[in-house]
Image (cartoon, rainbow, N blue to C red):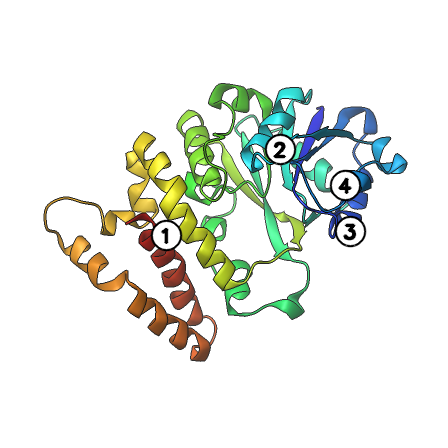
C-alpha cells in the first residue's frame, strides 16, 4: 500500500528539528512512502529549514504564498498526493519509527476507513491539571471498547490516517473554517459516509510537543464558538448537542435553556477557575470540562 504523509506547518522552526527526522526515517519501504510538507506561509525560518538537502531528498515541500489555515494546508497535500492511504500529521507531533507501518497494517481490514493515533505528551513532567485532563482522563476515544467503531465526535485529525478513496467521497476540508472545529465538521461528514469505519489505535503512540495552556485553549474555544461554530451549525444543525450550544439555542422556554442561562456566564467561569486550583485530579476534570464548554457557548451566544 502506498502511503502519503501530509504535514501541516505554520511557524514550526522551533520544533521541526525534533519532529522531522523521525518522520524521514520510518521503517516503511521508501518506494511506497510519500511525504509532503505544506508550509502555510511561515514567518519564522521554517522555509529555510525545509531547504535542508537531507530532508529534501525524502520529502516534497509545498509553500503557500499567504497564511490560509490548516484546512487549506491539508487540502494542498491531498490534491498532490499519490498514496492510497493519507496520514495527516501536525508539525509538533513526534513519531516512532514504525508509525507508518503500524497505520498501514491496520488497513488490511477493509472495514477500517480512518484510524486515530494515541496522543501522549512529550514529557509527563510538564503536566498540569489541564494537560492531565487531556492525556490521563478517561475521555474521547478512550471511552470506546477496543475494536469498536468510534463516534464521529472522537475522531480528531491531529495524527490520523484515512483511505484516500474515502477522502475523495467525503470531499476536501472546509477552508471557511480556519481554526477550531475543523475536526468535528470533517469527522461528521466522513462518518456519514462510513458510520462503522472510524477506529482508535491505542498501541500507535505519538508524542505531542506544543501543549497549550488552559487559558490559551479557552480563548481558542471561545473564538471557535464565535466564528466557526455558526458556519458548522448552519450546515449541520444536528451537531448542536455535541457542542453545548443547545443550552443557549433560541426558542421556547425549556429547562435546558434555563440551566444554560444560569451556568454559562463569566461569574461562574471565575468560580470554576478558582475551584480548579484546589480540586485534586481527577475531580479537576469536571471544572476543566466546564470551562471549555462554557468558552464555546459564551463565544456562540
Mark 2: secondary structure: loop
The number of callouts visible is 4
91 sits to left or right of 75: right
Name above or below for residue 273 compared with residue 13. below
233 sits to left or right of 3: left
Q: Which residue is mark 2?
A: 66
Q: Residue at x 64, y 34 (%)?
A: 87
Mark 2 closeness class: few <14, some 14–19, many ≥20 residues within 10 Å: few
From the top left corner, tell me how far across and down residue 90 is, in percent.
Answer: 64, 43
Point out which mark residue 18 bears: 3
Q: Nearer the viewer, mark 2 or mark 4?
A: 2
Mark 3 closeness class: few <14, some 14–19, many ≥20 residues within 10 Å: some
Q: Nearer the viewer, mark 3 or mark 4?
A: 3
Work out which residue is located at the far bottom of the displayed protein and give it.
Answer: 278
Q: Nearer the viewer, residue 179 or 170?
A: 179
Name above or below for residue 88 compared with residue 277. above
Name above or below for residue 128 compared with residue 247. below
Quadrant in the picture for residue 160: top right
From the top left corner, tell me how far across and down residue 248 is, in percent.
Answer: 23, 50
Q: Residue at x 29, y 48 (%)?
A: 245
Q: Which comes before the other along the chain, label 3 or label 4?
A: 3
- What separation in Å lies between label 2 and label 1 (alpha carbons)? 28 Å
Q: Which residue is mark 4?
A: 23
Q: Which comes before the other along the chain, label 4 or label 1?
A: 4
Report if residue 52 is visible in the image. yes
Mark 4 closeness class: few <14, some 14–19, many ≥20 residues within 10 Å: many
Q: Nearer the viewer, residue 276 or 25?
A: 276
Q: Which residue is mark 1?
A: 296
Point out which mark residue 133 bears: none
- What separation in Å lies between label 3 and label 4 (alpha carbons)? 10 Å
Amino acid at each position: 500500500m502506498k502511503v502519503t504523509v501530509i504535514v501541516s506547518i505554520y511557524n514550526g522552526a522551533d520544533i521541526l528539528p525534533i519532529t522531522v527526522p523521525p518522520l524521514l526515517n520510518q521503517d516503511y519501504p521508501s518506494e511506497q512512502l510519500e511525504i509532503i510538507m505544506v508550509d502555510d506561509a511561515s514567518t519564522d525560518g521554517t522555509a529555510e529549514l525545509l531547504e535542508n538537502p537531507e530532508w529534501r531528498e525524502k520529502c516534497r515541500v509545498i509553500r503557500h504564498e499567504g497564511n490560509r489555515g490548516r484546512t487549506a494546508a491539508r487540502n494542498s497535500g491531498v490534491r498532490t498526493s499519490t498514496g492510497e492511504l493519507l496520514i495527516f500529521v501536525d508539525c509538533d507531533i513526534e513519531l516512532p519509527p514504525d508509525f507508518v507501518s503500524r497505520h498501514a497494517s491496520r488497513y488490511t481490514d477493509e472495514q477500517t476507513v480512518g484510524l486515530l493515533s494515541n496522543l501522549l505528551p512529550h514529557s509527563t513532567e510538564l503536566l498540569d491539571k489541564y494537560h492531565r485532563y487531556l492525556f490521563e482522563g478517561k475521555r474521547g476515544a478512550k471511552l470506546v471498547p477496543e475494536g469498536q467503531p468510534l463516534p464521529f465526535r472522537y475522531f480528531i485529525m491531529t495524527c490520523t490516517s484515512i483511505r484516500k478513496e474515502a477522502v475523495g467521497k467525503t470531499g476536501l476540508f472546509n477552508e471557511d473554517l480556519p481554526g477550531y472545529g475543523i475536526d468535528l465538521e470533517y469527522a461528521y461528514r466522513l462518518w456519514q459516509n462510513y458510520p462503522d469505519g472510524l477506529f482508535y489505535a491505542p498501541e500507535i503512540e505519538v508524542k505531542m510537543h506544543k501543549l497549550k495552556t488552559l487559558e490559551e485553549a479557552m480563548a481558542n474555544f471561545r473564538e471557535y464558538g464565535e466564528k466557526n461554530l455558526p458556519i458548522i451549525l448552519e450546515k449541520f444543525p444536528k451537531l448542536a448537542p455535541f457542542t453545548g450550544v443547545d443550552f443557549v439555542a433560541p426558542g421556547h422556554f425549556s429547562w435546558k435553556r434555563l440551566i444554560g442561562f444560569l451556568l454559562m456566564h463569566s461569574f461562574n467561569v471565575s468560580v470554576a477557575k478558582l475551584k480548579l486550583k484546589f480540586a485534586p485530579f481527577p475531580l479537576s476534570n469536571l471544572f476543566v470540562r466546564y470551562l471549555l464548554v462554557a468558552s464555546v457557548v459564551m463565544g456562540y451566544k
